Amino acid sequence: MTGVTASPPVPLHLILGEEELLVERTVQAVLAAVRTVDPDTELRRFRGSELTAGQLAEQLSPSLFAEGRLVVVAGAHEVGKELATAITEYAAAPADGIVLVVLHAGGARGKALADDLRKAGAAVTKCDKITRADDRADFVRGEVRRLGGKIAPGAVGVLLEAVGSDLRELAAATGQLVSDTGGTIDEAAVRRYHRGRAESTGFAVADKVVAGDRSGALEALRWSLTLGVPAVLVADALADAVRTLAKVGAAGRGDPNRLAGTLGMPPWKIRKAQGQVRAWRPEALAVAFAAAAEVNAEVKGAAADPAYALERAVRRMIDAREAR
């Protein structure tokens, strides 16, 4: 019996636009498609403004061991003439086993390169900034469908009011609601978790803690628990925030686009953590790690009062950040 051979991946992709969440999702979708053919494909990211034509040629040269590679060049609208020429020439005859993904803002700057890649047959994906309210509403509805849920028409507007316009926060809130409601979201469900306040999520509590905002963190914690956010989700958000700081801090002050593949997180998250981690000494992070681990155990059954355990963890983390 003859097996089914997977089709070779598209060797050239052009992603146009500046909506980071959509851009990153597209990159991950391309990577997933490539890894269905070659599971060992390596992801390498570069910033166009920091890349030379020679370095690009090295990255796009076939390996002696035929190792798969996906090369992402971000900020292609910023590249100089020499690198733009190198990208265009490669696009005319891409190497086997290598997939090139070019990220371009999509405006007039560097438009010639984008046009050349189109002519070369690149698969084009548009990720334009979502600025209109109607488009954000469409995004929310699409997110719910993608996750296998349903949302009432009135609930979309309530969610947009509660969370705001940031696509990453909308995606996170939508995912939480689909999970918590079993997939059927109505206005009551949105109001129960948000009540017009974006501060009601565990991630918001963690953000306040990382920023050292004691009163803001405690207020956000009280709101989240009052509005029904499970204590375990708040504890998980605190642990995730500390892990992110530690990983980004250990990686140093590199380009977020390059570090994304290594750290396993999107560039926007790395960029944000790079600005936050400067305020945290290694000793403070160690204390925060211990507090996060302890409160995770407590809210999963070890503590009689999960709310008190969370408040104690928040205070302990901020105390560590402030200690000198």
Image (cartoon, rainbow, N blue to C red):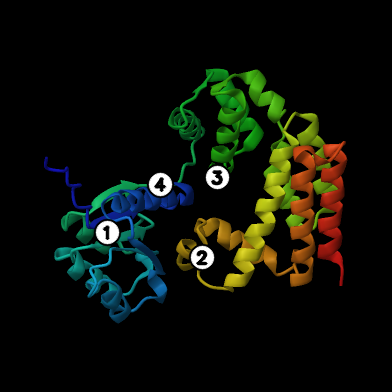
Q: CA distance from mark 4 to mark 2?
A: 21 Å
* Residue topped by disc 2: 256
CB-based contact (under 8 Å), mark 4 and mark 1: no
Residue occupied by mark 3: 168
The disc label shown at residue 114, or none: 1
Q: Of callouts 2 and 3, which one flags the residue occurring earlier in the amino acid sequence? A: 3
Question: Pointer 2: residues within 10 angstroms few (<14), some, or many (20+)?
Answer: many
Which residue is situated farthest in the bottom direction here? 54
Q: Is residue 257 visible?
A: yes
Which numbered marker is on residue 128? 4
Residue shown at 46%/49% (left/top)?
19
Q: Helix, strand or loop at disc 2?
A: helix
Which is in the foreground here, disc 1 or disc 3? 3
* Residue type (three-letter) at the residue carrying disc 2: Pro
Answer yes or no: do the residues labelled 4 and 2 have beta carbons within 8 Å?
A: no
* Secondary element type, mark 3: helix
**Residue 245 position in % (x across, y down):** 66, 62
**Which kind of residue does numbered mark 4 sit on?**
Asp
Measure how far apart labels 4 and 3 are at the Cα level.
Answer: 14 Å
From the image, which quarter does the C terminus lie in? bottom right
Instruction: Give the mark nearest the N terminus, 4 or 3.
Output: 4
Q: Are marks 2 and 1 in contact (CB under 8 Å)?
A: no
Q: CA distance from mark 2 to mark 1?
A: 23 Å
| Residue 124 appears left or right of 187 | left
- Mark 1 vs mark 3: which is more N-terminal? 1
Lateral position of residue 127 relative to residue 98, left or right:
right
The residue drawn where x is 72% and y is 33% is 229
